[in-house]
Image: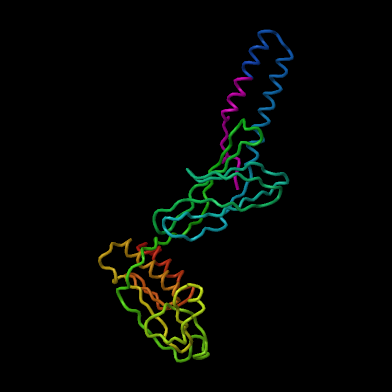
């Protein structure tokens, strides 16, 4: 929540122009002894002071909280969802939010309400991305004053390595038999699809997918052989650290696309083979945080 000592306020360029106009009106009214001119000058000056109070009050007590941060690949835009909270009984018009050197978003907050806004920032490298310092500002109601406040929110986004280009497979996947079927039912239990390989039975080919021009795929059933692929750090000795991580990231995405069970071997961590969404997230997280000092 923005407090009284966290708000800065200065006249805008329109405010400086307004002040210059009042000065000229005041000098002219004194020079010509024009009481009505003096009255108008002081009336407008009072209006300006009231405007400054409303501009400052538009930010006072505004609540901000990080709602969610997405997980993306290096080179993509990270999205931070910021929740604006208005606990007052009157509205807060023209609230501007932006990161430093980022795109500005303007929103109106209704009385006693909250609102989610999405702010984006470019990413260049993998790892943890703390939310940058946030600036909330306003020129409400007349644009004569500019008030702003800096907010430090706690939270971060996780940036995965950028997936490398598809490469020729340098190692053959291994296979394992599951005698009880993947779901404990038997050979009639459909598990998923994998890419077609020469020698697969025509009865197990998904001809409907072929008719939809989605390529040749082979159906897998419980008790049938299942693909088991190890993504190993040592498979890419000719690459540097970041290039290896990108290649392994591509391997994770390809294994998930082909519905393969896969394991991951890194110098500091080993993930046992599995085929699930949790496995994908765990593998990508391990790649994103590779090399970090243990907390």
At x 62%, y 24%, the residue is 18
Magenta-drawn stretch contains 10: yes
Q: Which residues are drawn in magenta? A: 1-21
Viewer-closest of 284 and 30: 284
Residue drawn at x 38%, y 80% as measured from the top left: 197
Q: Is residue 101 magenta?
A: no
218 up-or-down from 248: above or below: below
Query: Does residue 244 appear left or right of residue 29 in this picture?
Result: left
- Name the side, left or right, on which 171 lies relative to 125: left
Q: How many marks?
A: 0
Q: Quadrant of residue 170?
A: bottom left
Find residue 161 and report its image quarter: bottom left
In the image, 195 versus 27, the foreground residue is 195
Asked if 113 appears above or below 29 in the picture, the reply is below
In the displayed image of the protein, which residue is found farthest to the left? 238
Q: Which residue is at the front of the view, 41 or 257?
A: 257
Q: Residue at x 66, y 42 (%)?
A: 93
Q: Position of residue 160 (x, y in %)?
A: 42, 62
Looking at the rendered image, the quarter that the C terminus falls into is bottom left
Q: Picture coordinates of residue 221 (x, y %)? A: 48, 86
């Amino acid at each position: 929540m923005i407090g009284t000592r966290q708000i800065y306020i200065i006249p805008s360029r329109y405010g400086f122009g307004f002040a210059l106009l009042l000065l000229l009106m005041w000098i002219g009214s004194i020079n010509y002894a024009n009481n009505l001119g003096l009255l108008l000058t002081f009336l407008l000056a009072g209006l300006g002071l009231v405007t400054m109070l409303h501009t400052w009050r538009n930010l006072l007590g505004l609540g901000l909280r990080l709602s969610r941060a997405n997980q993306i690949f290096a080179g993509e835009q990270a999205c931070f969802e910021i929740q604006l909270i208005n606990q007052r009984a009157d509205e807060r018009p023209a609230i501007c939010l932006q990161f430093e050197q980022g795109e500005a978003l303007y929103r109106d907050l209704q009385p006693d309400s909250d609102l989610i806004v999405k702010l984006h920032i470019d990413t260049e490298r993998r790892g943890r991305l703390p939310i940058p310092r946030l600036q909330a500002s306003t020129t409400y109601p007349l644009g004569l004053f500019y008030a702003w406040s800096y907010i430090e929110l706690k939270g971060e986004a996780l940036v995965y390595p950028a997936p490398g280009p598809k490469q020729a497979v340098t190692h053959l996947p291994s296979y394992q038999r599951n005698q009880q079927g993947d779901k404990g039912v038997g050979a009639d239990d459909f598990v998923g699809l994998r890419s077609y390989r020469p020698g697969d039975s025509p009865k197990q080919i998904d001809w409907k997918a072929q008719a939809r021009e989605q390529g040749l795929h082979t159906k897998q059933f419980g008790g049938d052989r299942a693909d088991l692929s190890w993504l190993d750090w040592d498979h890419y000795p000719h690459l540097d650290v970041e290039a290896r991580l990108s290649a392994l990231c591509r391997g994770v995405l390809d294994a998930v696309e082909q519905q393969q069970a896969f394991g991951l071997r890194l110098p500091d961590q080993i993930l046992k083979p599995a085929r699930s969404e949790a496995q994908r997230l765990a593998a990508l997280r391990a790649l994103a945080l590779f090399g970090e000092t243990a907390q």
